[in-house]
Image: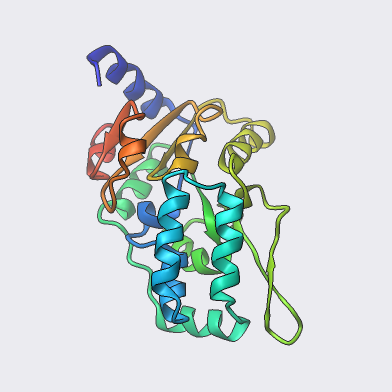
């Protein structure tokens, strides 16, 4: 990153009203849907599809729909998964979120994952549920998988940008920075005023090569506040 570009990005970072984080492979070390797939015995089939989605090789909605049809998770499986699986926070994220709050910035989680799997992550970081934008699984009254809520903006490509636009309009934020590891994060800016690529868990070359500010350690951002 050229020094004048770097200065401009750091300025946006320091002056942001709000910061939005992707969750899978960013705030947490794993991909939630991959972990759920492993738990349901469908791990290998799903990991390949997740990779295609993250690298932008198929539309997010098609990838999500295909993966969920394969996993076909019941409500009982989701509950059991949550009882036995503790999400692994990425090193430095707790300190970064605390520092952002100390500087008066609001923090949001914006994910293509599922709110039921992300609620424990939000709780660990003291992020209120209303600051979480994610997909919603649906079940029949028998507890069988019935699909996902296609009205959630995060269920489709371009959804993260839509959420950020909504935050600006509804909450009056002037400057929002988005942080994430995948193709759906890259396309969130604009309307996000800056995008910071994160490669601390997995480096996606197509994201890294198109990102002005790319980091592999959250401490770099904490130091720049």
Q: Left or right of 212: which side holds 57? A: right
Q: Nearer the viewer, residue 101 or 153?
A: 153
Q: Is residue 105 visible?
A: no
Q: Looking at the image, which residue is at 50% across and 30% down? A: 189
Q: Residue at x 36, y 51 (%)?
A: 26
Q: Quadrant of residue 73?
A: bottom right
In the rendered view, would you say 38 is above or below 96? below
Instruction: Report the quarter where the C terminus lies.
Output: top left
Query: Residue 147: x, y in percent?
Result: 68, 68
Place of residue 190 in the rendered image (x, y in percent of width and height, measured from the top left): 53, 27
On screen, residue 168 above or below 126: above
Q: Classify 110 as above or below 46.
A: above
Residue 42: image quadrant is bottom left
- Front residue of this view, candidates 168 and 70: 70
Q: Is residue 54 above or below residue 211?
A: below
Residue 162: x %, y % from top left: 63, 38
Residue at 52% over, 35% down: 188
Q: Residue furthest toward the right?
A: 141
Answer with left or right where residue 167 lies relative to residue 113.
right
């Amino acid at each position: 990153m050229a020094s004048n570009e770097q200065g401009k990005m750091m300025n946006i970072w320091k002056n942001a009203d709000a910061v939005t984080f992707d969750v899978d492979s960013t705030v947490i070390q794993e991909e939630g849907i991959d972990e759920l797939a492993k738990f349901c015995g469908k791990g290998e089939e799903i990991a390949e599809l997740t990779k295609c989605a993250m690298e932008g090789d198929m539309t997010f909605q098609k990838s999500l729909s295909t993966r969920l049809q394969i996993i076909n998770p019941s409500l009982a499986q989701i509950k059991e998964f949550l009882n036995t699986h503790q999400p692994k926070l990425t090193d430095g994220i707790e300190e970064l979120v605390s520092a952002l709050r100390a500087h008066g910035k609001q923090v949001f989680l914006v994910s293509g994952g599922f709110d039921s799997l992300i609620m424990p992550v939000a709780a660990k970081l003291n992020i209120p549920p209303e600051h979480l934008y994610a997909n919603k699984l649906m079940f029949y009254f028998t507890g069988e998988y019935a699909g996902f809520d296609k009205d959630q903006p995060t269920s489709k490509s371009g959804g993260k940008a839509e959420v950020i636009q909504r935050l600006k309009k509804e909450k009056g934020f002037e400057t929002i920075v988005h942080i994430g590891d995948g193709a759906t994060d890259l396309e969130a800016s604009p309307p996000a005023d800056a995008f910071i690529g994160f490669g601390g868990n997995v480096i996606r070359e197509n994201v890294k090569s198109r990102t002005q500010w790319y980091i592999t350690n959250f401490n770099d951002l904490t130091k720049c506040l």
